[in-house]
Image (spheres, helix red, strand yellow):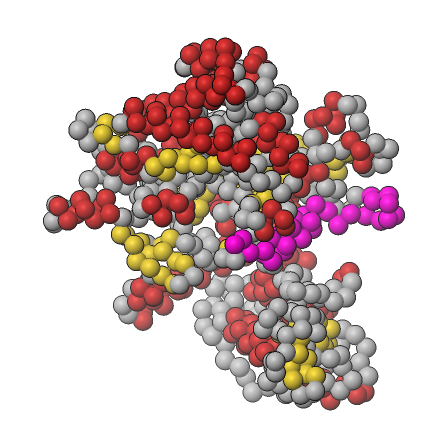
Amino acid sequence: MTEIMARGGGVGINLSSLRPRRAIVRGVNGSSSGAVSWGGLFSYTTGLIEQGGSRRGALMLMMNDWHPDVEDFITVKQTMGQVTNANLSVCVSNDFMKAVKEDLDWELVFPDTTDPDYDELWDGDLDKWKKAGRSIIPYKTVKAREVWHTIIESAWKSAEPGVVFMEYYNQMSNSWYFNPIICTNPCGEQGLPGWGVCNLSAMNLSKFYDEANHDVAWDELATTTRYSVRFLDNVIDRTPYHFEENELNQKKERRVGLGTMGLAELMIKLNIRYGSPESLEFLDKLYGFIAREAYLASADIAEEKGSFQAFDAELFLQSGFMKNMAEVYPEVAEAVRKKGARNVTVITQAPTGSTGTMVGTSTGIEPYFAFKYFRQSRLGFDEQFVPIAQDWLDSHPGEELPDYYVTAMSLSAEDHIRVQAAIQRWVDSSISKTANCPSDFTVEDTKRLYELAFDLGCKGVTIYRDGSRDVQVLQTEKKEDKAAEATTASTAETALEQSAAGQAAEETASVEPAAASVAVTASPSKSGLDKQYKKRPQVLRGATYKMNTPFGMAYITINDLDGIPSEIFLNVGKAGSDVFAMAEALGRVCSLFLRYGDHGNKVELLIKHLKGIGGTGAIGFGANRVESIADAVAKALETHVANNAEADHDHDPAPVAATMAPADAGEAEATAAAGNGGHGAHAGGSMSLDLCPSCGGASLINIEGCKTCGNCGYSKCS
């Protein structure tokens, strides 16, 4: 994986072959940490790699719907820091979708790892394992709709995971009989077998407009398509392969993928509204034409140079895709039988985000995001104008753009899916496309959209709900401009309160199970959403918790107001260090959050969002394992809340200090200092470490008066 990424390639990994969590591992007489934990490792490794010195490695992680860890996989990105450098998709089968529609049970299973041939035979293909008569172990029975809802809700929240209808994908695949598809590349447009290779190119459709006849320049498009297929086929033989397995597989099947960009620009030139019924007819004709010419070109090259090694005419023509091709274009099936096929696939629709932008046209099969927008890059925000729209406005002063000038956000999500389905009919691989949705798109809307994609024959689906991620590459407004839109303080305050109320309702629903197990006693006089900031009285009571963290010993003081935690002091690291400054900032922000308003589960929300945040290291084992300072705060809060639930605060005074580990007398002074927000040094505590500006690890210490990193060797004095 690292070797491929370091050379500019992306990698797709299906985690389904890995043992589920708690499965027996006989070799070490223990149990597995689970497939998802390996996903975290792959993600971390991807983040360390820069492709060409300018961009991170690209990774797709997938898991099949039958795997016992699939529920954890779906929600893994909701735990900050666990998987941050990978796209996620769930591989969904036809049987699972049937179970969803009929509200049936769904069994999560895995092969019997005690099978004597497990290590040799198990490769992640559950159907092949079953056909061989091998046993499987049921781990859990769930409702298919519950798993489906978890996928939908997670996609609605953060645009992940995507869904790949993998069983349908293989039914349509030309390599079904010798090389099943197990995963896709990071963008999702190219389904691949093990050791499969992407070989992609794209034609700029905006250049094939016949202005004289107000039509597509069909002859030029046919010629370019045929040249492009030959070009891609030649690339296979000229490519230097780093791994022999990649070379053997690629020359066995000669998989190529010709796609397009500039579709939206071409349709504007033809006065066709993207997403309209007229556009669906046009797309069927256009992409059917491209597929026909590409397959005829592949047959001609096969006659000249020979078919791909695994070619079998009758089996090849039995794929779902070729059956459709033979029905509409029988001359293609005839050419394949007579001449053969040089390539197992020839059409792939990539996103072409960089290349489309570079040549100044619309990307992939997407409509324009907007005709005026701000593009975010490493240099900041850059205002962009789409030339075809600007030219029309310049030549028609004072007029609005015609209705066929549509943008991604002005289309309905269903329009996006119907366009994708119309094109998918003529794409033998798959399509990288995002269905853009407005910010008020609901979870139920998302569910209908995903099910529509399955019903219409899409091989995969991904949505993006506007604003559902902290960072997006394209925006219609600058962030500074959005802030300036609040013209009066009262208007801004009203909007804030409404947003807070909606967020409170959503978050409260998500933490109700936690609230039931960890009770917080709220003041009887407070109910609903209290929007007032609670001022700090002169005296508060609480407790101080001593916890070991990757940055040294931390003293976490939690004080209560009306029986509810409302103030957190953090003392970790030496005064003046970056760790000390960030810990103090974390304490202040948490205190502000706890004292502003209350919707009943505020403490549980804070625990939920801080717990599990990881960094470059961790300390401790099991329940005492601490991933970071934020994780330590969450654990201290959990302990504090549990202690409060057992104590009667109306009669028994709160303890001045408590510890989560035995403390000696020499540490009492430091504990007291922490409780008062003091900056005293830790007496007898562990060494305080600061952050290294080079590697980012908690490993910067003072050696001979100079800050030196014990991890990477960085020295401030050198």
Say which residue appears at 74% left-offset and 27% top-offset.
129
Residue 99 vertical position relative to residue 479 in the rendered view, above or below: above
Left or right of 654 in this view: 458? left
The residue segment tinted magenta is 24-52
Q: Position of residue 243 (x, y in %)?
A: 65, 40
Say which residue appears at 42% left-offset and 42% top-offset.
352
Q: Is residue 32 magenta?
A: yes
Q: Is residue 436 magenta?
A: no
**345 or 471: nearer the viewer:** 345
Left or right of 608 in this view: 440? left
Residue 572 vertical position relative to residue 427 in the rendered view, above or below: below
Observer able to see residue 512? no
Say which residue appears at 45% left-offset and 18% top-offset.
300
Q: Position of residue 673 (x, y in %)?
A: 67, 87
**429 or 345: nearer the viewer:** 345
Residue 432 vertical position relative to residue 290 in the rendered view, above or below: below
Left or right of 293 in this view: 17? right
Q: Position of residue 693 (x, y in %)?
A: 58, 73
Observer able to see residue 232? yes
Say which residue appears at 61% left-offset and 69% top-offset.
696
